[in-house]
Amino acid sequence: MSTLTVNADSVLAIEIGSINTRAVLFDVVENRYRFLGAGNALTTAGAPFHDIMAGVREAISQLEQATGRTLIGVDDRLILPVQADGSGVDRCVATMSAGAPMRVVAVGLLEDVSAQSAQNLANTTYAQVVEVLSLNDRRSTAARLDAVLRARPDVIIMAGGAEGGASRSVMKLVEAVGLACYVTPKEQRPPVLFAGNQSLAKPIRDELAAYASVYIAPNIRPAIETEQLLAAQTQLAEVYRQNRKRHIAGVDVIESWTNGHLLSSAMTFGRTIRFIGNEYAKTRKGVLGVDVGGSNTTLAAAFGDNLKLHVNARLGIGENLPGLLAHSAVDEIIRWSHMELSEETVRDFIYNKAAYPASLPVTNEELALEHLLTSQIIQVALKKIMRSFPSEAFRAGAGLLPWFEPIIASGSVLTQAPSRGQTAMTLLNALQPTGVTTLALDQNNLAPMIGAASSVAPILTVQALDATNFINLGTVISPIGQAQPGVPILRVRVMFNDGSETTHDIKYGALDIINLPAGQSATLHLHPLHRFDVGMGGAGRSGSVKVIGGMLGLIIDARGRPINLPADPGRRRDLIKKWHWTLGAA
Amino acid sequence: MYAPIRQIIPIAYIQRKRLLPVPGKVTVRQGGKVIATDAVAEAILEPEHILYDLARGLGVPEDEVEKYIQRKPDMEVEEGDVLAGPVGITRRVVRATRAGRVVLTAGGHLLLQVKSQVFTLRAGMSGVVTELHPDRGVTIETTGGLVQGVWGNGRLGVGQLSIVAQSPDEELTPARLDMSMRLAVLLGGACSNPEVLRLAEELPLRGLILASMSAALIPQALKMRCPVIVLDGFGRLPMNPVAYQLLSTSERNEVSINAEPWNHLTGNRPEVILSVPAGARPLETPDVERFQKGDLVRVVRQPFHGKIGELTSTPALSSLANGIVAPAAWVAFEDHQKMILPLTNLEVLK
């Protein structure tokens, strides 16, 4: 446990999501930062308010009621810093995901190299790539110009040229971009973010500065085999901030409260995951974060200091839910249900939910359906981010999720579920973790705000990442290998702190719970059979691991990877029902 | 908590901004009267350009091109017009291959914006143009009956209302459509049969107002020219009684349908506007209000999806039937059923 050695500031963190706006207060209690309370309101970026401040003030007002602290003064302004009477806060940080995604034109030399990197950079924020220009497309300069104009971009991201590499070809592409900026009416000209060969930064600025705001970022593709997105994200964050300021009323007020530090929620979520990644670097496993929102789904994976961040800007459990149908067939979604559902029911549900994105499931059936769709959303998002995982990440086999410790889940749909078993079931089916991992739930949806706070109160980030905010759902053990259902594949010996022991023989295909009360530690000795791999250094290798019991105890997921569901619908539903029952998700 | 408001109003004062997605030209004057299908502004959404390499075309060095250019920026040209030249004894010229407007001449090149197909922005409702937004569009105002929906196929139309649905929960079947409905706006109930949409297009109808529609029909509806508006949701849902009462008593009334998709950010949503007698006095309707006991609410999700009830308790944080904790209130329905429902699943009817 870290203790404070400096004067600590109270911090108000605000997150303006696509559906909800949340205000959270952190302050030091007994020498340690604590989460004191939260206020929640519907986001008011859209009609009829068209100003985020109505929602922000409502959320803060709720927070004031919850904490008994006055934060807004009689002049309707945030009281900064804390006053002698205890009102106000010392610092304010804010993150945002509300608003339409930025329309991006990605430009690069080669379609699957620098142009792909430009797209990958766009995918680290709330953006939608609407056009890609590269030398591969063979269009004339005029055709490229028209393509950019028709795309009506909010930003043009240009990459290309390894350091010390190509320059003429890059400048050829700049020609179309420059023409597009020139032809576009002045007030609608998109900014250009150049993240390519740094020797071209000045010529590009000279060429474009008269017609566009030019941002220069470090080369995201310094060598053909190397992609480095992280450094350019700072400039992209600035573009995002300016874009929100231009399109959403009230952002300027938040800017004044935060000293101009409004950040995208995805970026700060990634920051938190990266921070945890550094903390867990000694495990040689990555850390995975999943945040399912109403309009977006963000996945972040940290392998030590190396962060992979992917925002799915048109895939969420609210307004963008129909976007799921572009990736998944309805029958594929239904296959994972323990209920008998028709395609029509699911399709109607998707469109009704999209019409009223803030609506909540009231019945168990609707709750199950919402989790079914959430699981599918995560699967789609996972496939996309997995392409960017480093090849050296430890994993038991091609196409399988690398070893992660822990896996952190955020987002109301997961955190609001009345049964933790339901949340665990959704995550297990979607992610299909391997080896030994811990499922942690960001129960107050703090991860983006903690990441935002790291720039003003780093110690807060350290101390907020504790078990009161991130609850341990359970340690999951997932042996990897092939066997016939019912064949014993793993022997688990649990050595409890009181000296007692239990032994469990795990059969292939089973999903089991071993009772280990929350917070209680135990040592597991894992002895895989038939050359199954439990992440102890190779197939068939045994080993011991110290674990702490979660809300659900220890979860043994021996269903195989990938999970193969029975073809017969009745048998399949019975089996899934059994799994739900085991985890208490039914 | 702020309450989303669903407007179903017999006589409302309606003001709508109609704006182009890109700058263009406003084609109506302030104070002018329009009907839903009238053009109010136009713009080029799909610009097309041609870049002429004049230096190469004329066979002269880049830095000499300037003196041969015949058409300067902003000048209109017709197909075949000389853009630059003549040069030399052979009197070489570069001609416009399409009609358009010169955008730029520089570096030995000329950029021509070709005359392209124009996108026309239509009024979307009958009324009076009360404000012009230069290069972008107009504000239109009217007094009329207003029924907002949840989904539209992006089309708009005007016509006389013809009532087919004899009750709010009636299924619209192909057998109910006949030639007498040609060019009418039809009030149907629930629709799950693709044949209904095919016939609506074939007759043709000027509009189709549905209580609900199977979501599987969305791709077909999006391809139709006839505007289709869904008032209550997807699946098989009855029309909410307030909307049904208003629409079913307006047979032969002229109605405008603007079936634009619901955009939660802009607030634009599909709606039906009924004409009312001149001089009718509109009711005052707030844009925003908070949920309070006594509100007439419509449920937007199962259970009770589409039903209308009354808020009988003060909203408070409560545990729902499945254990989720959320701001909620008791809602009493006409059939004496009561249930605690989250506020997010309700909209206030005005």
Image: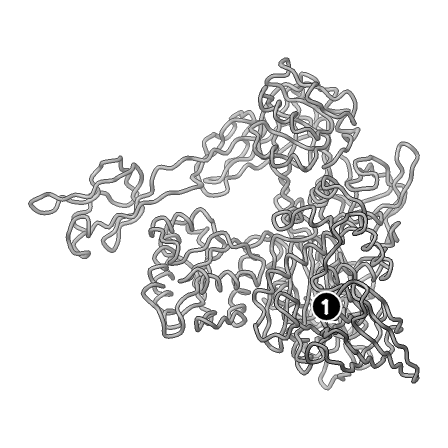
Identity of the amino acid at label 1?
Ile
Pick out the residue farthest to the bottom: A5
The percent coordinates of residue B241 (x first, y second) are 79, 28
Q: Is residue A171 above or below residue B162?
A: below
Q: Quadrant of the N terminus of chain A?
A: bottom right
Pick out the residue farthest to the left: B89
Taking the spot 47% from the left edge, 39% from the top edge, the residue there is B134
In the image: residue A313, left or right of residue A213: right
In the image: residue B313, left or right of residue B123: right
Compare residues A156 and B76 and report the one nearer the observer.
Answer: A156
Disc 1 packing (10 Å; few <14; some 14–19; many ≥20) = many
Q: Is residue A154 above or below residue A162?
A: above
Compare residues A485 and B329 and report the one nearer the observer.
Answer: A485
Compare residues A546 and B54 and report the one nearer the observer.
Answer: A546
Taking the spot 72% from the left edge, 32% from the top edge, the residue there is B212
In the image: residue A162, left or right of residue B106: right
Would residue A12 be seen by someone viewing this image from the given angle? Answer: no
Q: Which residue is mark 1?
A: A408
